[in-house]
Image (cartoon, rainbow, N blue to C red):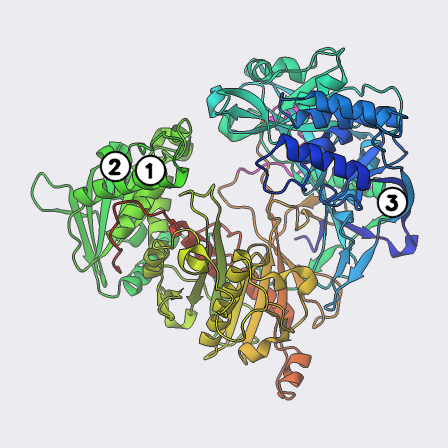
Amino acid sequence: MYRTIRVAAYDPDPLHGPWREEMRVLRLGGELHTELTRMHAEADKGSARPDRLPVRRLNSLLQAMVPGVIATGRKAGTDGCLPWLYAREAVPPEVLAPVIGTWAAGMYRGENDTEGADLEERLRSDDPAEAVQLPHWEIESVDLAETVTSAGGTAEPAARLYNLLPEWIAFRLAARTFRTGGTTLHFRVESSGNGARIVSWPPQRYESRGQTWYYSACLNIAVHTVPFAPRFRVHVSTQVRRWATQLDVRPHQLGGTTVLLDAPLPWPEGPDRGHRLMVNTLGYDRRLKELAWRHHSPAPLVPELDIVRNYPQPAELFTHPERWINGSGNVAAGIVYHPSIGPHKVGPGLMPRERADLDAWVEEGLRPMLTRVPDLTRVTRSNTPSLLPRSGAGCGPGVRDAQLALQRRAALARALNGRPLEVDVFWQSPETRAALLAELPKLIGFPPGERVGSADEDTWWWRGEGVEIRVRARPAGPLAEALPVSRERRRPKAVRLAEAVEGRCRLVADRMDPRSDGIGVVIAEIAGKERFAAVPDSDPKHALRIAWARQGRLSQFVNLPDDTESGLDHRAKWTWLDAFRQLGAISSPAHRVGAGIPGDLQYAALWLVRHTRKGPTRCPVRRLVAVRVRPEDGPGVIEGWDAERAEWVPYPKLLLLLSQAAEPGAEAGKGGGVPGDGEAAGGGLRPAVRPTVDQYRQRETELQIRALLFQLRDRPTLLLADAGNLRQCWPRLRNGELDRDMLGFGTEAAQRHTLYGDDLRVVLVRDANAREEVAEWYAHDAKGKVGFAEGVWGTAETERESRVFASTASTPHTAAKLPKGLMKLAPTAQGRTAPGKTAWNPGQLEVTVLGCLSEKALADSGREGDLPDRPAEWATLTHQLRYHDDYPSLARPLPLHLARLAGQYVLPVVRTNEEGSTPSAP
């Protein structure tokens, strides 16, 4: 058993002293900013913000084509006084002027594009009457460890370091080579919105079945903070970057994929030559009806700067991706692989040994300015709750399955509460129908079902121990067909989709029989979403969920056998288990933390559902979901908060209520507005300034949270929240706003968390969140062995001072067992197929015990004589809530998992001429 884990995170080394780097800094300046703003307003007369320059393409072009440019500053397009470019040395005007001129010409989209050439001449001109003055480069000593410590003790880097420091680190690492197993990797820098990356280039090759597949090592670099940590962190994660050389899609199906362009610099001198790859987006332009460079890609401008070389055109790159990844005339381009464009024989991920080797290489390259954060050690031996054993004495064949069936049956009986369960199965393949009917009795320990009704009816019945289930199976027919969404582009997408949804709702209503007193669930077999990719919004899944919710029925979907790689029995099992979850027939196993956890503790979890106009129904909406679990009430007792009626309702009823989510803007007052100047949101004083819609929604959500906390005061409560999710509507959950045992809302001063409940504990969890917010990890020992380990981990702080912990779960027993030392970047003779393996690595869940009954919290509440909490016990409890007998280890604690999945029913649609019916309670 490993006793320590190592995280791939680094912080400024205090022993190194001040960390300053001399850089050249350029600001757009007043004259150039004014001229570019004029040109932008003339080129884009419909722009809502002509003063906001679209400099993203210019920044990408400068970073890729101008030697020495390290990073670009934020918001330089709106304020000419802010730092715009950071460089190792001043870029001469004869290099900078043509780049700016080429970009300016691109703003005109072929109309009057001579303006760009004129601007270039004026930037070079010595005539004071015509010249536009290029700003002068300034020398600045930049503190790359500049930090501000919040009132709660969290170190936050200066704002510019979030972009500047990852780029600086990326160039430092890219200047070195990585050698492993006789293979030498060279790296290039790739800028990203959340930091920077380095990618091994040229790509590695893997031969499989007579074809060549391409892949690279990829290291992601990002700057982040950790609650209450005295220094900010640099996270470096590793992955396999796969390149697409066989595209199994048609051009019109390509929504947008990343393309990295390797182009030689047209200027002969300068530092960092050849170290950067240019980021572009290739996709189908429905206006032009052809493939094009999209999303401000700089690729179309490069030929204007370099007229000698041949650069790939979108259609040519799509047709011959392998030719371009191997290079043509010193120019190469790689399409970043995504599963939506076809299969790839190189598996994702790296195993611990290879990640540890890369991590050691990074550590060496960052010295002496950055040092590795200390290893984490175990804080408990109680890694899991009271789960049913998988092996050992008394675990003969079928014993565990019988115990699981008994648990499920008890939870189902409690959730149904004496009411029958009516299940309608709409199938497309007879194999799926048979698997569903066979798997249900196995899961709950019943004999094969009894067929009831006439010979023409495919209806089955089970009854026993407080559970009655009736299943009716019938062909799905047109219900599972693609939605016929109108292609009349003059009307909004949301309206056209809503009309199609209403049409499918009418079809469902015609096919459904009136529901009796039972609880209704529908299981429908539909094609995978890839089958509907050719026509946007034609996937019927969400429309069917809305339609059945209006009939008062929950819904669960299973894909056609040809659309998934998993076995039919496996999919049938998980279909039923998820249906049980929607019924609330699930409960958390008893914890094994200790006497420090109150026996009557209840769990509450908050999750924010946030859809934009690109969401499942093309309607933006924000909805707070709250779930409550009371373990002492027994299995099958899960409730959700009905904000409209201000009461707790059974979980299945919550799902149906969420399906009635208001149409866009309804949450922000009637007609989508906000309270007027004569109104006060939520009561109280009239606001001095009219709030924005986002501010109003934030205020309303925070009021909801306060009301919820008041409803939970009757017993000890553990409030669980995902900081990365909830800070969108509760900004005081940002790391820099946190303070131990305090809760803050809006602009008010933070208050003791015990004011919201004498026995309230608050735990925040956070994962990588697609932004590397939580560092990668691997277990290791003194002998150099590396691998995985499950448990709760913490720093060497004293037991009652530490508030931040790491939760790592076990590898699922269903995952392929691979050697921890598997090498994919440098395959050995014995492991030639290693690149084809999928390396699964458990993620780290950061657990922050924000509020507990610490000595100070008890003293501030006048309870000095009470025994204080041990934060590690509450972190351990949160960790154990990730485990359940029916599931692999969950990404989040079970109550939070239930709240997140409830968001699948938040499906608002705009109103059409025909009003839909209102769902009834189950």
Question: Residue 540's mark?
Answer: 1
Question: Residue 479's mark?
Answer: 2
* Quadrant hosting residue 593: bottom right
Left or right: residue 766 compared with residue 143: left
Image depth: mark 3 or mark 2 in front: 2
* Vertical arrangement, residue 772 with respect to residue 305, above or below: below
* Vertical arrangement, residue 195 with respect to residue 593, above or below: above
- Residue 685 point in image, percent of width and height: 54, 75
How many numbered marks have been drawn onto this rendered protein structure? 3
Identify the amino acid type marked 1.
Pro
In the depicted view, which residue is nearer to us: 511 or 399?
Answer: 511
Query: Among all residues in the image, which is located at the extreme left?
Result: 454
Image depth: mark 3 or mark 1 in front: 1
- Residue 654 point in image, percent of width and height: 35, 60
Callout 3: 10 Å neighbours few (<14), some, many (20+)?
few
Q: Earlier in the sequence, mark 1 or mark 2?
A: 2
Q: Contact, CB < 8 Å: mark 3 with mark 2? A: no
In the depicted view, which residue is nearer to us: 27 or 359?
Answer: 27
Callout 1: 10 Å neighbours few (<14), some, many (20+)?
many
| Label 3 secondary element | loop
Question: Residue 367's mark?
Answer: 3
Identify the amino acid type marked 2.
Leu
Left or right: residue 297 compared with residue 510: right
For the residues labelled 1 and 2, the Cα–Cα distance comes to 8 Å
For the residues labelled 3 and 2, the Cα–Cα distance comes to 62 Å
| Residue sitting at x 60%, y 31% | 295
Q: Contact, CB < 8 Å: mark 1 with mark 2? A: yes
- Residue 293 point in image, percent of width and height: 60, 24
